[in-house]
Each structure stands twice: as structure tokens, then as C-alpha cells.
Image: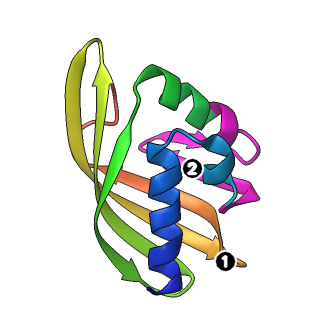
Amino acid sequence: MAFAEELLHRHIDAFNAADPDRLLADFTPSATWITGDYTVPGGELRSFFEGAMRSIRPRLALTRTIDGGNTVVAEMTETWTHGGESKSATLVAVFDLVGGKIDRAKIYREGSADV
């Protein structure tokens, strides 16, 4: 398995296990997360992920990976629950890597990023 694919599988496994320690191990300390018009600045990813994991319990399923070396693209399906209703959306995540860790993630979600 190639490095990028390993990284994404670790990311998804940690995300689905709602394990912020494992999830954040693959991010640089200054990593940013961008979804739509919302940017989570470096140093604030833990509270962002913990809040999402508690409130909507999102889960990811990897469809395919495109390994561009220092930029990795993943097509995924995200499912979550909000107000007792199950929802899902296809998304594309572009991960910029620095030193083998995610330094920037830009998420393009089908439909709205709103819950």
C-alpha cells in the first residue's frame, strides 16, 4: 500500500473510531481545515473534531485516492446523524502534506456543508 493510501486509511479509521488523538497524530501542529467558507485555524483542530464527533457522529468511507506526492486527493462518502435523521454526502478532500503529515485539508462537499 502506498504512503498516501496508508495515511488516508489511518485518517479514516481514527475519524470513524472518534479518536481525536490518533486522528491528530497525522496533522502538523499548524494544520488548517477548510470546509466551504469555514476555516479551522491551526491549533484548533482538536476542539473542532471533538465537537463534530460528539454532536453528529460522522463516518467516512473511502471511494478512491489520487496520490500526487505532496498533495493527496480522496473521494469519500460521509454519513452523519442530525436531529435523529441520517444524512450522507459525497465529498472530495484535498490534503496538502508537509513532512508526511497533513498541513492543510480543503473539503468539497456535495450539496451543503450545513448540518
- Residue 31 figure quarter: bottom right
Which residue shows up at 47% across the image and 54% down it?
13
Q: Position of residue 55 (x, y in %)?
A: 46, 20
What residue range appears in magenta? Answer: 26-47
Rendered position, 91 above or below 86: below
Task: Give how far across and how far down residue 8 sits, in percent.
Answer: 47, 67
The numbered dot on residue 111 is none
Q: Is residue 56 magenta?
A: no
**Which quadrant is home to the C terminus?**
top left
Identified by mark 2, the residue type is Trp
Give the side of residue 108 with respect to residue 98, left or right: left
Q: Secondary structure at mark 2?
A: strand
Alpha carbons under labels 2 and 1: distance apart: 17 Å
Question: Horizontal and vertical percent for residue 40?
Answer: 62, 41
Which one is in front in this view, the residue at disc 2 or the one at disc 1?
1
Q: Amino acid at mark 1?
A: Gly
Q: Residue at x 60, y 51 (%)?
A: 23
Against 19, is 50 above or below? Answer: above
Residue appearing at x 49%, y 43% in the figure: 17
Residue 38 is covered by the magenta coloring: yes
Which residue is under mark 1? 100
Q: Which mark is residue 33?
A: 2
The image quarter containing residue 103 is: bottom right
Asked if labels 1 and 2 touch by Cβ distance under 8 angstroms, the answer is no
The mark that comes first in sequence, 2 or 1, is 2
